[in-house]
Image (cartoon, grey):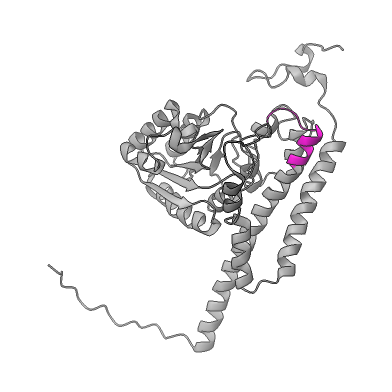
Amino acid sequence: MPVATEAPPASSAKPRKPAEAEKLIAEQQQEATDLWLHLYKEMLRIRRFEEQAFQQYQKGTIGGFCHLYIGQEAVCVGAISCLEKGDKVLTGYRDHGHALAMGMRADSLMAELFGKATGCAKGKGGSMHFFHNELGMMGGNGIVGSHIPVATGVAFAQKYKNEKNVTLAFYGDGAAQQGAVHEAMNLAGLWRLPIIFVLENNNYGMGTAVDRSSSTKDLYKRAVGYNFPGVTCDGMDVLVVRKCFSEAIARARHDNTPTLIEAKTYRYRGHSMSDPAAYRTPEEVDLKKKEDPILMLKAELLLRRVPDAQLAAIDDAAKHEAMESVAHAQAAPEPELVELARDVVANPWAANLLPKVEI
């Protein structure tokens, strides 16, 4: 039965003049274009950095594990663009893109890949452990799914301190099957914590397709069991990602409602640098490259009449930054041997107590 309502009172505001209205519309459109250009720039910075990391790994200047983020840029860029000062990010070992999107310098990241003293973790962490406390990048983590309970604890601290901040916890479809992930989600739902669980579903957990490892293909529906919203979005479209995360983050900030977001994405390279990705066909990869998030946003910007030369200049700047980061890493000093004994315990030893390391 319809509910009767009173007619709203007549507005006393004067209507805008046509020229004022057109100016306002133009300003709003420019703000949107500026935002899109920022997203485009950030995705390109990640793509060009990763391409340089790929080349340097092949040359042998980068050792250890190295997991590239090429193809998935829209997820972290769209999500992190919604954050505010004091918000936190934790992710797994494919962390280069998240670190750049959080504002970490390419120089310090490439130096870390090279194992140099000027790296963000003093050359000790390598590819999987990018970290910057002041920027809220609480680290990449090498153990599958291990950081999700930690991220849930970070969100607990934010609520306990009434900080009105949120935590983004990124993980992959492989980690989605880990027991600790479900335990953390249960606590987040029970205690109503301001956390967004970001499931970057790139279809493969290492070389295993998700439909061979999960009893359900719709992983976001698992949130129902923990009494908080679960949604999915096109992780190849940065504008769709941003809209989805802006809504979830607003909920978390307002009333501490957790959300599980399954971002359907795709990585164009293997699981790691040592993975030839023989479990998928070249045709599959070529088909997915038609959904390249950078090219998709570029097409939208061209429709907004952003000059192609301006977009090319943004790309050139991203390439230059990546190449300069390699030059910095090559010139950076190796860590001193005494660093082997530092950062091992919570309370650093006095300098005179550090063991002497002799060659």
In this view, 338 is above or below 253: above
The percent position of residue 249, horizontal first and vertical second, equals 45, 50
Q: Residue at x 19, y 73 (%)?
A: 5
Quadrant of res 259: top left
- Tell how many labels: 0
Specify whether residue 88 is in view. Answer: yes
Quadrant of res 12: bottom left
Relative placement, left or right, of 173 versus 9 is: right
Query: In this view, which residue lies farthest toward the bottom?
Result: 18
The quarter of the image holding the C terminus is top right
In this view, 106 is above or below 358: below
The quarter of the image holding the N terminus is bottom left
The percent position of residue 58, horizontal first and vertical second, equals 78, 36
Residue 199 lies in the magenta stretch: no
In this view, 289 is above or below 86: below
Residue 60 lies in the magenta stretch: yes
Specify whether residue 72 is in view. Answer: no
Magenta residues (range): 53-65
Q: Residue at x 69, y 19 (%)?
A: 348
- Foreground pick, 57 / 132: 57
In this view, 64 is above or below 298: above
- Foreground pick, 265 / 350: 265
Relative placement, left or right, of 303 versus 161 is: right
- Foreground pick, 138 / 303: 303
Relative placement, left or right, of 60 versus 45 is: right
Quadrant of res 338: top right
The percent position of residue 250, horizontal first and vertical second, equals 43, 52
The percent position of residue 10, horizontal first and vertical second, equals 30, 83
